[in-house]
Image: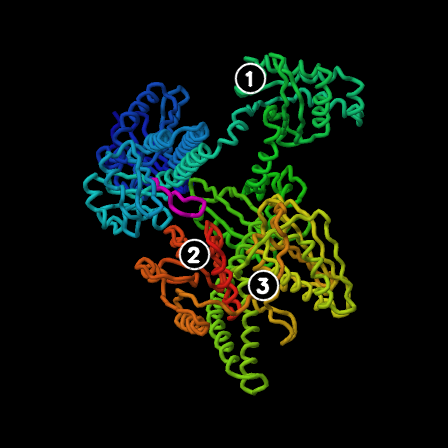
Amino acid sequence: MITPSSRNFQPEEPSHADMVQSLPHIVWTAQPGGWVDWFSREFEQYTGFSDALNAQHGWVEAVHPDDRGKLAESWVRSREAAHSYTTELRVWSQQTQSWRANLVSARAQLSPDGQIVRWFGTVTDIQSLRDAENERAFELKFRKIESEILRAIGTGGTLQQIFTLICHKIEDLLPDARTVITHIAPDGFIGEGFSISMPAAFIDACKGMPVGAKAGSCGTAAYRRELVIVEDTLTDPLWEDCRELAFTYGLRSSISCPVLDEAGNSVATLALHFLKPFQLSNAEIMTARRLSEFVFLALSATRDRELLQQSEERYRSLFDLMPVSVWEEDVSVVLEDLAALKRGGLVDFRSWIDDNPDFVVEMIRKIRIVGVNQAALSVHRVASVDALAERLATFGADPALRPDFADHLCALFADDTYYESQRTITDADGKSHDILLRIIRATPTSSRLLVVEMDLTDQIQAEHRFRTIAQATSDVIYERDIAADHVWVSNGLSQHFGYPPFHEGHPRSFWIENVHAEDRDRVVAEMDRAIDTDGAEWSHEYRFRKFAGEFVPVRENAVIVRDLSGKAVRVIGNMTDLSEQKSLEERLRRSQRMEAVGRLTGGIAHDFNNILAIIIGNAEFLLDYHPEGTPERRMVENIDQAADRASELTAHLLGFSRQQALVPKPTDLNAVIGRTHTLLHRSLTPAIHLELDLAPDAHFASIDQPMFESALLNLCVNARDAMPSGGRLTISTRNRVLDGSWQKGDFEQPQAGRYVEITVSDTGTGMSADVRAWMFEPFFTTKPAGKGSGLGLPMVYGFVKQSRGHLRVESAPGAGTSISFYLPAIEPESTEIIATDAKPAEHGMASAAVLVVEDESLVREHLVALLQSMGHEVTATIIPHEALALIEAGQHFDIIISDIVMPGGMNGVEFARTLRDSGIETPILLVSGFTDDIEILSGGLQDRIDFLKKPYRRSDIVERMQNLLTKPAM
């Protein structure tokens, strides 16, 4: 047993005392028997023991109680054998108020006859070394855990299996932790939970709780979408609403990490609960952060598998029948032989290998397969790696396959990193397979090759679809080593941005230099800020330069990887070209703007038509009371003419808004264009040459002929105004089959199908991009004041869209304009194709009992007065339900005149259908300024039903009534 020295013993001060006292660790001496008789000042400063040598075993109190026996045994062995010793002990640290690992060393000073004269020793703090070793061990263990979880996700484990594995691994790593994984429902409530250590009652109690600012650790983390740490649940305000739950299950501290989807929304949480309050370490925080990412991976993988199972019916054969063979080859021996040929001066390896075909088989036999998957063994009908190597050598000896292997050797000779070919092989059963072979070499100097074979025998036709999908989802992937200032980048940079491949990577400055100058400072500063702070993710949009010099919008998403100390060491991310997305968004905004303006103008025009109907009707009344030549009659005629012009304007507005009532009929467009040739020619100036280029086989289309003629005339007048000095105007027709694809920059996306293309082209001044963007807006015009209403092209747009057609505009300043519209093609019918002008009906007719259904009071009063002036007996109602009540009560009517758009839950078409379904065959005249997509003359309503467009004249209503009253019931 070691005993302290005598109180009166005063050892002689060792030599070089000042030097010893200045050392950063404890130095001590002891007598031959082991009595410690001197410590350097560092002992008192380190341990806080000021009178250790004078107290009974005082200095021993600085050693951890569990290590004192170990210390005594070391002394006994060293004293008996008279040799030095080194051991590790835990020594009390005054500064950290904890036991710290120290290395204690003792060395004996021997006399000439080998006797111990004195002991000299040191005590050195090695706790930092042990901490670093522990952190490394923890990191290695954590990486193994991550690998196991990734393997479980990658091999298709169920969500429960993966969550069970995550919980087990966390609690093996942190035995005091109680792991809980919870789903966050889209409605903002905690959903299903999972745990292996918390009771089911706790999971059930949490389910249905709302996320919020004081919803415990999990609810708050999901609400904030950031990590939440609670050191004591009994005092932390975040658990204010959940205190009873924490008390019931003994939860005192916790850490919860939200799991966010691609849009940044919380979809789950990963929480570590502890049964005692304490300050969480980096280990617990890092565990929660890193493993929460695997929760998201598990959720995403499971979701993707479920979606794939729902939609993979048409792709199932592709993926089920395309076994992918993968193996790794070591070609180091082959590369040595190729290097020898290079050193010998061989340059034209292609010609040389053609002259030495046996060299191919010799090289194949020198390839060593170091790893192979089961699919490769199954496809080649072999049971081992050696058998596969032998089979490949057999392929090389086949004269039909030898050129392919020779091409592969040429790629190796040229230090290529990628090789692809397609070959046909015969398996052991004599069946031929079309194989797509891809060989990847990590770097031009690498001796390892990754070989991938895909059997495309039953899937050649699906290859285009597969490649399109793969191309559509590929981005530029990169990994940045921050310390080395080195960035590795995928081939996406070459494929999508045109840059040459960077086999060895590039410095970060390459990226910075190609960010647009206006975005550069902001983007770089935000990325650096995320790295320098505790940011875990970074996302931003900016403009990036392609190799050709063009800047395109991109979105970059990055994850910042940090070490145990929180220092950023790597950045992993992807960059996506947003050009197509931005273009689609602009098209959508333009379409929505046109739709909104269309609804607004259509509503205004409809209401205005009701007013015009009253003005025109009353003007006609007044004309009957004022003879020709009187000033009063002239004033009424001016009112009538102004109303006509206003009616034309509303017709244009309704045409743009696609609410103009059309009467489509099968029409020979070539015949219509030919008939209107004279009218079109008269609308042009003599300096303009009009050419017709009509395809003889142009299809028929179902259109409203007068509206088509009006649209054509509008386009020709616009072309005329664009050629003030003359030029050439061409109208052409062609048959087109559109497959759904459309050139970038076109106005809209068409439905696939057969169309008739009508193109009006001029050699005029053309339009800028800004003008093209607004050309179909109502009242937009580039003409001088008073020279244009700005409604011509909007009417064309509305007519084409209402006819289920599509538009395309090609124009540039100084290059003329070409406007094409595409109308769905139909087969010609045996009936009359081109509508002819109807002869106006006579005004006189017998008196009839008329039922009027109209909700607008002014319109209703005007129509009643008009009909009564003709001698008819008129009954008026406001809504269809009132009219039905009169008919059901037995009141007889010869004809019913009803508005279409009315309140009360039933419109005019539904009113007419109800009458026909009830067996009532009374003639019906439907009246409206627009149809708003109501199928007026369909669904069995054709029998003794006609349509009259507002605003109408007295002659129009007389004509329609006569036709209906004289037409016999079917």
The answer to whether residue 249 of the structure is visible from this angle is yes
* Front of the two marks 2 and 1: 2
Q: Position of residue 217 (x, y in %)?
A: 30, 45
Number of marks: 3
The answer to whether residue 772 of the structure is visible from this angle is no
Nearer to the camera, 467 or 133? 467
Chain-order first, disc 2 or disc 1: 1
Which amino acid, mark 1? Answer: Leu
Q: Position of residue 712 (x, y in %)?
A: 66, 61
* Front of the two marks 1 and 3: 3
Colour theme: rainbow
Q: Which residue is mark 3?
A: 794
The picture quadrant where one finds residue 108 is top left
In the depicted structure, whether residue 659 falls above or below residue 724? above
Nearer to the camera, 253 or 156? 156
427 sits left or right of 598 in the view: right
**Residue name at image x 57 percent, y 66 percent:** 840
Around disc 3, counting alpha carbons within 10 Å, would you say few (fewer than 14), some (14 to 19), or many (20 or more)? many
Instruction: Find residue 909 and name its label.
Output: 2
Span highlighted in magenta in the image = 259-270
Chain-order first, disc 1 or disc 3: 1
272 sits left or right of 916 in the view: left
**Residue name at image x 59 percent, y 55 percent:** 703
Q: CA distance from mark 2 to mark 3?
A: 28 Å
The picture quadrant where one finds residue 651 is bottom right
In the depicted structure, whether residue 680 falls above or below residue 549? below
Which amino acid, mark 3? Answer: Pro
- The quarter of the image holding the N terminus is top left
Q: Which residue is mark 1?
A: 377
**Residue name at image x 39 percent, y 36 percent:** 131
Q: Secondary structure at mark 3?
A: helix
Q: Residue furthest bottom?
A: 631
